[in-house]
Image (cartoon, grey):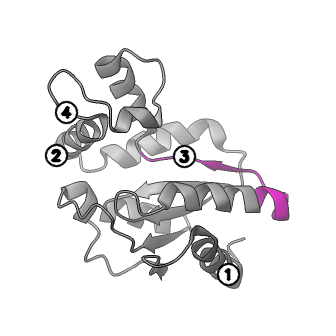
């Protein structure tokens, strides 16, 4: 299974790019692929424990809990706290999620946020793409931890690009590197 990591700030287009790449890879290469965020397991926990919901839904990102905290803020606080206990917490979580998908050719990971996560993708023979759009300008650790990272395989300045153009750059890079 070849991992393709996507990094970028909040609302930079990471998930949209991952979905477009998944659709393209499945359609054009006859390969099996999944989009698997690093923190899916944590999202499920927050959905159940904080919102009494069985599944995470995008509306929970902005839903406000009784404490005045949004689902996204809750994920950030929990993720940072758990990383303080074990810096590889997110990698361990991802590896557990991927165990049942050994048969797949590709995994697209649309939420690479820390250097050790990007390094893990590289250690598995994958690539990491960085998107530069930054509409929120958050200073949260989960948004800034990769700002100085030097080993991105591709950096796409998508601040003024439509998703079609961002996708075209990513697709061309992956084909040129013979990843897909």
Foreground mark, 2 or 4?
4
| Secondary structure under the numbered disc 2 in the rendered image | helix
- Say whether disc 3 or disc 2 marks the residue closer to the N-terminus: 3
- Say whether disc 3 or disc 1 marks the residue closer to the N-terminus: 3
Kindly check if marks 2 and 1 are in contact, taking CB atoms under 8 A apart as contact: no
| Secondary structure under the numbered disc 4 in the rendered image | loop
- Say whether disc 4 or disc 3 marks the residue closer to the N-terminus: 3
Kindly check if marks 4 and 3 are in contact, taking CB atoms under 8 A apart as contact: no
- The answer, for residue 45, to whether it is visible in the render is yes
Q: Is residue 119 left or right of residue 141?
A: right
- Say whether disc 4 or disc 1 marks the residue closer to the N-terminus: 4
| Secondary structure under the numbered disc 3 in the rendered image | loop
- The span from disc 4 to disc 1 (Cα, nearest Å) is 40 Å
**Residue where numbered disc 3 is placed:** 36
**Residue where numbered disc 1 is placed:** 172
Q: Residue at x 78, y 56 (%)?
A: 26
Foreground mark, 4 or 1?
4
Q: Position of residue 117 (x, y in %)?
A: 38, 59
| Quarter of the N terminus within the rendering | bottom right
- The span from disc 3 to disc 1 (Cα, nearest Å) is 22 Å
The label number, if any, that marks residue 84 in the structure image: 2
| Quarter of the C terminus within the rendering | bottom right
Q: Residue at x 43, y 61 (%)?
A: 120
- The span from disc 2 to disc 4 (Cα, nearest Å) is 21 Å
What's the magenta region? 25-38
Q: Residues within 10 Å of mark 1 (few under 14, many from 20)?
A: few
Q: Residues within 10 Å of mark 3 (few under 14, many from 20)?
A: some
Kindly check if marks 2 and 4 are in contact, taking CB atoms under 8 A apart as contact: no
């Amino acid at each position: 299974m070849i991992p393709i990591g996507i990094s970028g700030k909040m609302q930079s287009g990471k998930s949209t790019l991952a979905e477009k790449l998944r659709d393209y890879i499945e359609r054009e290469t006859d390969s099996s692929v999944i989009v698997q965020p690093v923190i899916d397991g944590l999202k499920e926990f927050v959905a159940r424990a904080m919102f009494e919901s069985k599944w995470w839904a995008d509306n929970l990102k902005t839903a406000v809990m009784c404490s005045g905290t949004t689902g996204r803020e809750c994920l950030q606080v929990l993720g940072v706290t758990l990383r303080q206990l074990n810096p590889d917490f997110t990698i361990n979580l991802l590896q557990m999620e991927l165990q049942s998908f050994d048969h797949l050719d590709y995994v697209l990971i649309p939420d690479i946020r820390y250097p050790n996560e990007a390094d893990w993708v590289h250690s598995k023979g994958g690539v990491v793409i960085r998107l530069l759009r930054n509409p929120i300008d958050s200073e949260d650790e989960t948004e800034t931890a990769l700002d100085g990272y030097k080993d991105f395989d591709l950096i796409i300045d998508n601040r003024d690009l439509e998703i079609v153009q961002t996708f075209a750059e990513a697709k061309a890079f992956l084909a040129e590197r013979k990843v897909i």
